[in-house]
Amino acid sequence: MGTPGWIALGVGVALFLLSIALPTPRRLWVAEVYAAKHIGAWLLDLVGIRRLVARARGREHVPLTRPRLARRYCEDMGPTYIKLGQIIASSAGLFPKPYVEEFRKCLDRVRPFSYEEVEIILGEELGHDWRTKLVELDPRPLASASIAQVHTAKLADGTAVVVKVQRPGIQSRVRADMRIIRQLARVAAVVKRDAELANPVGVVEDFSETLRQELDFRLEADNLARFNDIMRELGHGDVRAPFPHKELTTPRVLVMERFFGLRVDDIEGIREKAIDAESMLLKGLRAWFQTVLFHGFFHGDVHAGNLMMLDDGSAGFLDFGIVGRFDQRQRDMITDYLIAFSTGNYDALADVIIAMSRPEQSWNKALLVKDLETAYSPMLRLSFGELNYAEILPEIQRVASKHRMRLPQEFVLITKQMLYFDRYAKLLAPDLNVFTDPRLVMSMMGDIMTARAQRSDGAPQATAPAAPDEAEAEVPTQSATVRG
C-alpha cells in the first residue's frame, strides 16, 4: 500500500474513532448495528433456521413478526425508543393493533438496571450519608420503567416511601437520540404528502419537551405538590397524589410517599373488597376535570397504572412526569367544546374546533358538522361497555385531516386522557357513560358556571361546588395491598 493509501486508511480510522467518541454519531452506529442484528434474525426466521435451532434445543419456536422485531429493536436501543413504544402501546386505534399489543410489553417489562448503580446514583445525588436518610431500601425494584426504576424504603422515622432513581447515562443518550429523530421528522415533513397536517416536527418537539421535563424529577415533585394543593383548595380530601419529600429530591432522584391500595384495573381485588368502583371512577374523573377547568393544570398520563384505589378510601393519582397546561383562552375553548359536545350541538362544536385548529384554507362547515356528528354521537348514545374507544380518537383526527385542520397538541392530550378511562371503565362500570351520566354532567355544568362567573367577576379561584350526593358515595376501606 502506497503513502496515499495509508493516509486514506489513517483518515478513515480517525473518522471512525471520532464518530464513536461523539454521542450522536455513536448512537447512529448503535442504531445500525441493532438494525443489522434484527434484520439478520428475521432472515434466519424466514428461511426456517431459527425454527430448526429451537426444535434442536427442545424449545418452542416463536415467529419474529414485524411488531415483535420492532419492540425488541426499541428495547435494545434504550429509554428514548422504549418511550416511543409506550406511546404506541397507549394509543390504541392510532397504530395497527398488532403493534399496540406487542408494545404493551414495554409498559411493565422494561429491563431493570443493577442495584449497584442505584447505590452509586443515590450517593452522587443525596451525599455519602444517604443510608442514614433512607433505611430498609429494597434492592429489588418495585417497578422498572423507561426513564427510571422504583425501590421501596423507609425514612429514618419509619415513614414508608418509594425511591425513584433515574437510569444511568440517560440524559446524554436521550439528547443524541432526539437529534437523530428530529432529522428524521424533518425528512418526513418534506417527502410525505400532507405531512404538514400530521406535523411530524411538532410531534417530535412535543415529545422532546416531555422527555426534558420527565428527566428532571424536581419538576415532578412540584407537580405532585401542586396537585395536592389544588385538591385541598377544591375540597377533595379523598383524592390525592403521593407527598413528595423535596429535601430528598434532586434531578435524578425522587423520594415520595408510598401508596397502599389497588390498581384501578385490579378487578378481582376490587370485587373481593366490595368497593364501589363506579363512585370511585366518578370521583377521580370529576377531580381531574376540575384541575383543567379551574387551574389549567392536569395529569397528562392517566392510564390504569397511574390511578389507584387506596386503603383509606381515597383515589390516588400516580406519576406526574407528564402534565398538561392550558392558558385562559384554551380553558375557555375547552369548556365551550364540552358544553357543545355534551348537549349534542354539533354546529357549535364545529365553531370551537375551527377556532382551535385555525385552518389556513377554507372549509365546508355543513360537511364538517355532519362528520363531527358521525364521530362524536356514539359517545352520547352508548355506554362505555358498548363503545369502542380505540376508534374514537383516530376518527376525530381523520375528520380534522379530511378538513385540513391540525388539532392542537393540548386538545389531543386532553382527549386522550378521557379515552384512557376506557381501559378500566369497561371493567368497573360497563353501563356508565361519563358524557351523559347526570351525576357527572350536573357537576360539570355547575363547575363551568362557577369558573366563568369567577373570571367575569375577576374574583380569585374559589372552592368548586360540591358534587351531587350520588357521585360522592363513600368507598369502603381496603386492607393493605402493596402498590404494584
Image (cartoon, rainbow, N blue to C red):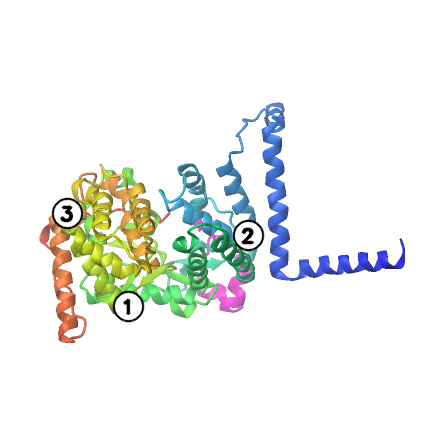
Q: Quadrant of residue 433?
A: top left
Q: Amino acid at mark 2?
A: Ser
Decide which of 412, 148 is in the foreground and name it: 412
**Residues at badges 1 and 2 in contact (C-beta under 8 Å)?**
no
Residue 120 located within the stretch drawn in magenta: yes
**Amino acid type for the residue under numbered disc 1:** Asp
**Dot 2 corresponds to which residue?**
114
Work out how far the residue at label 2 is from the one at label 3, CA to CA, in angstroms. Answer: 49 Å
User: What is the secondary structure assignment of the residue under circle 3?
Assistant: loop
Q: Magenta segment range?
A: 118-146
State which tag comes first along the sequence, 2 or 3.
2
Q: Residue 134 in the image: x percent, y percent? A: 45, 62
Q: Which numbered circle lies on residue 436?
A: 3
Q: Residue 29: where, in percent of width, then height? A: 64, 52
Q: Secondary structure at mark 1?
A: loop
Residue 208 shows in this picture: yes
Tag 1 residue: 327
